[in-house]
Image (cartoon, rainbow, N blue to C red):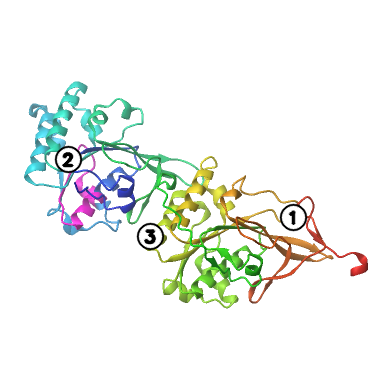
Amino acid sequence: MKRLSTGASDLDLILGGGLEPGSVVVLSGPPGAGKTILAQQMCFAGAAEGRKAVYYTALSEPHSKLVEHLRGFSFFAPEHLGPSIRYVHLGDMLRDRSQGTFAALIDEVVRTAFEEEPSLVVIDSMKMVRDFVGEHDLRMSLYDLTSRVAHSGVVLLLLGEYTPEETQTGAEFAIADGIIQMSYEFTAPMDRRGLRVLKLRGTPHLAGTHTMHITSDGVRVHPRVESLKQGEVRLRGERVRTGIPGLDELTGGGIPRDDATLVLGPTGVGKTIGCLHFLAEGIGQGGRCLYITFQDTPEELIQTAATFGWDFEAARKDGTLIISHVPMGDLDLDALASVARHALADGTIIRIVIDGLSEMANAARQAQRFPAYLRSLLGVIRAGGASLWVTSETGAFGPIEEPLAGLMFLFHNVIQLRYIEHCAEIGRAVNILKMRNSPHDSGLHTCHVTGAGLTIGERLRNASGMLAWTVLRDCPPPGER
């Protein structure tokens, strides 16, 4: 049976393909969670494909006001009002107890379902209807309603400002085929909305709380990446060049194409420049690349690349380079994963850069979740066929500490950039800490930032402090100076 699409592809993914015709689904959540916006967004999405919807309102705001609030959303199309989307006010029916209250409402909904043949019927809000009927009558009436609606093929969506506790005892939730719970959490630095499927009969829905945003396009839901089925990584045995002069020689001809590479280093040492090299090399090979950044804006990155001779502006215009800038205050783990997942969907992205990982871990404020999240994110990117290059910041001076709290094992390759004392001068040095199942140079080499970008130089043979027990120093013995 073909499922009813919500009009939001990622929400359909969470729901196992959409909502089943003939089902009753409760959409619950506190005020401001986005229930009404999502329900109306679903109505207009259906109307755009030629389907009808009926939206019942109880004792709530007037329809004119309800519609006026939709004008700021891109999904709103006034031409669908009337022919495809009909608003019905239930106030008089609820006030007139002589009609049998809920029995009359049920008859109205069932009549509409069979006579008008809509694909979606919404009651907003079902909890308000509760005030006009007793618990026993409500349970019997709802059973009658669901039995009759099941034969019509319509999806009946019941909205309500239910608490999590009420979902355990209410009659609506016992008879419902599906329960979708929306949440609104007040946290710093930004409030967070979420969506969780508590129940969806006969459907392999995605578990967990999924991030939800209300944008000018309406409700956007980002699936929790740990809930997604991980695809298989196709190991191709190829190596890709980093584009950094001298580095590929240290790595045995480049990094394995299917690997995830972590680049560690303090601020200003050249990590971002290395990222630009990596992307420029990929673009030069005719591939498409994705750059995810939390600090530098697209304009700043394009300007920086230009100083080294790379025309990222042209690459961005022709679609070979996608730059996704996520300000630290707006950072959300699931939204970030969605950026990568959607970019990989058509199979044309060959390189992805995430700059930088430690900032992402700190800003996300989800320390307990982060290890599982990172493992799943790397799996999604690798299964998508892209080479991944990730940066993470370390301390600038003195002994370094592992910034990812034991998570470096998730990366196949780890490259470290460091500052070094060189006979009363500050220089840069690079070494390959790890390349899994791959031969590589284990020495410490000089590293320079020039007009051509990042360059790897000669091997340092008199360096001390390589394992960070002391400050990294390079000063030849007196007789060799």
Q: Are marks 2 and 1 in contact (CB under 8 Å)?
A: no
User: Which structural element holds mark 1?
Assistant: loop
Q: Which kind of residue does numbered mark 2 sit on?
A: Gly
Q: Is residue 303 above or below residue 334?
A: below
Q: Which residue is mark 2?
A: 22
User: Which structural element holds mark 2?
Assistant: loop
Q: CA distance from mark 2 to mark 3?
A: 32 Å
Q: Which kind of residue does numbered mark 1 sit on?
A: Phe
Q: Residues within 10 Å of mark 2 (few under 14, many from 20)?
A: many
Mark 2 or mark 1: which comes first in sequence?
2
Q: CA distance from mark 2 to mark 1?
A: 65 Å
Q: Which residue is mark 1?
A: 397
Q: Which kind of residue does numbered mark 3 sit on?
A: Ala
Q: Residues within 10 Å of mark 1 (few under 14, many from 20)?
A: few
Residue 399 position in % (x across, y down): 75, 51
For the record, the magenta segment spans: 41-67
Based on the picture, tell me whether residue 58 belongs to the magenta stretch: yes
Mark 3 or mark 1: which comes first in sequence?
3
